[in-house]
Image (cartoon, grey):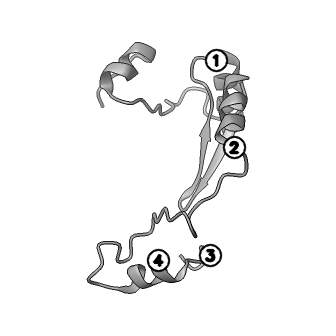
Amino acid sequence: MAEFPMCGACARDYRDPASRRFHAEPIACPECGPKLDGSMTDIVARLRAGGIVALKGIGGYQLMCDARNERAVSELRRSQRARRQALRGHGGNVASAERHWRLRRR
């Protein structure tokens, strides 16, 4: 967490064993938490146009593209050398995910 400076309130919670946020690394405070480099409108437009967007988090980057856009998925796979590996998708719930993807159990 040293590379992520916290505001005073978050620092107190992070260090207080009685706080539910004690050593909780994914702090999303509006004061010191993650910030977007662009607006959500810009990010959505880039995804809809077939672009790839990187979201930086504490554990690294999440790369995102529109899973319905074959060109964008191919480019993401090529860039990550993941031609045959499964990619993860995010959906609001299982029913909405099933409308877009073939799901299989592990």
> From the image, which quarter does the C terminus lie in?
top left
Give the camera-side residue of 91 and 11.
11
- Tell us which disc is closer to us: 3 or 4: 4
Amino acid type, label 1: Asn
Secondary structure at numbered mark 2: loop
Secondary structure at numbered mark 1: loop
Q: Which residue is mark 2?
A: 39
Amino acid type, label 2: Ser
Give the camera-side residue of 51 and 32.
32
Q: Which residue is mark 1?
A: 69
Residue drawn 38% across and 30% down?
A: 92
Amino acid type, label 3: Glu
Which label's residue is closer to the chain start, 1 or 4? 4
- The answer to whether 11 is drawn above or below residue 39 in the figure is below
- The answer to whether 13 is drawn above or below residue 24 in the figure is below
Task: Verify CB contact (< 8 Å) between mark 2 and mark 1.
Answer: no
Q: Which residue is mark 4?
A: 10
- The answer to whether 52 is drawn above or below residue 35 in the figure is above
Residue drawn 70% across and 18% down?
A: 71
Task: Verify CB contact (< 8 Å) between mark 1 and mark 4.
Answer: no
Secondary structure at numbered mark 4: helix
The disc placed on residue 3 is 3
Secondary structure at numbered mark 3: loop
- The answer to whether 4 is drawn above or below residue 80 in the figure is below
How far is mark 2 from mark 1, CA to CA? Answer: 22 Å
> Badge 4 local density, few (<14 within 10 Å), some, or many (20+)?
many
86 vs 52, left or right, is left
